[in-house]
Amino acid sequence: MRIDIITCLPRLLDSPFNDSILKRAQEKGIVTVAVHDLRNHATDRHRTTDDYAFGGGAGMVMMIEPIHRCISSLQSERTYDEIIYMSPDGELLTQSIANQLSLNQNLIFLCGHYKGVDERVREHLVTREISIGDYVLSGGELAAAVLADSIIRLLPGVLSDETSALTDSFQDGVLAPEVYTRPSDYNGWKVPDVLLAGNSAHIEDWKYENALKRTKKRRPGLLEGD
Ligand code: ADE
């Protein structure tokens, strides 16, 4: 898979992709993440990528031309499955969207800033808009990193068996069960007996019941298909 991220603040994305699982996924050749500085696609000598809003109002608007030039140059290299604009008014990211996007070959993520992008970018260039939650971030970069992480960890070969994504919360429409490690008794706070007894059928039943109980208590909406 290849993910191209378009941003006017490329340094914000240095660290998320240069550590741990996302770094290893790139080293193993499973994913290529390329970050593109929008300012390199500006047409004036000040490398301007934003301007005042027509009709007035506070805040700058990201201009269509540098964005179009950047997207077109990427499209001249390969075909993209989706061009995703990160925006608080996009569709809410869920595990099911991450699963679906992980099946694609080439994705572009466009990060907005200030008051966002000229509406014509959304109308004519973008194929999908995604929000990572009902709150407003300073820009789309951290949201793009979250979306990329949620997708990349699902790609075959990225996680070991031990950390397999199949047992994650949300993957079966329920939260993951509780987990424990040594010591089995810490100051009188005990690990459930069933996990120590070594009967794998009982352990599997317990995990299933525990996951259901936890979901009913914390996120009942998940069981009702919300
Ligand atoms: N940009 C600003 N806030 C955002 C959010 N919640 N999700 C995606 N992109 C954003």
Image: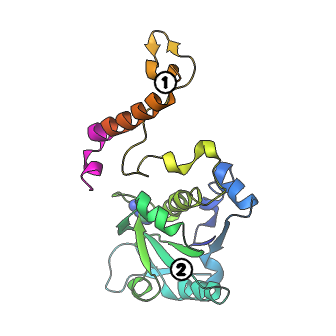
Question: In terms of depth relative to the viewer, which is nearer, 110 or 165?
Answer: 165
State the extent of the magenta-drawn residues as a range: 215-226
Q: Where the N terminus falls, by quadrant?
A: bottom right
**Residue denoted by label 1:** 195
Q: Where the C terminus falls, by quadrant?
A: bottom left
Question: In terms of depth relative to the viewer, which is nearer, 122 or 48?
Answer: 122
Q: Is residue 57 above or below residue 29?
A: below
**Residue denoted by label 2:** 81
Residue 10's tag is none
Q: In this view, does 73 lie above or below 223?
A: below
Judge whether residue 216 is colored magenta. yes
Q: Where is residue 112 in the image (x, y as percent from the top left)?
A: 47, 71
User: Closer to the N terminus: mark 1 or mark 2?
Assistant: 2
Q: Which of marks 1 and 2 is in front?
A: 1
Q: Can residue 139 be seen in this view?
A: no
Q: Position of residue 136 (x, y in %)?
A: 38, 60
- Callout 2 secondary element: loop
Q: Which residue is drawn at 54% across and 61% down?
A: 151
- Residue extending farthest to the top is 188
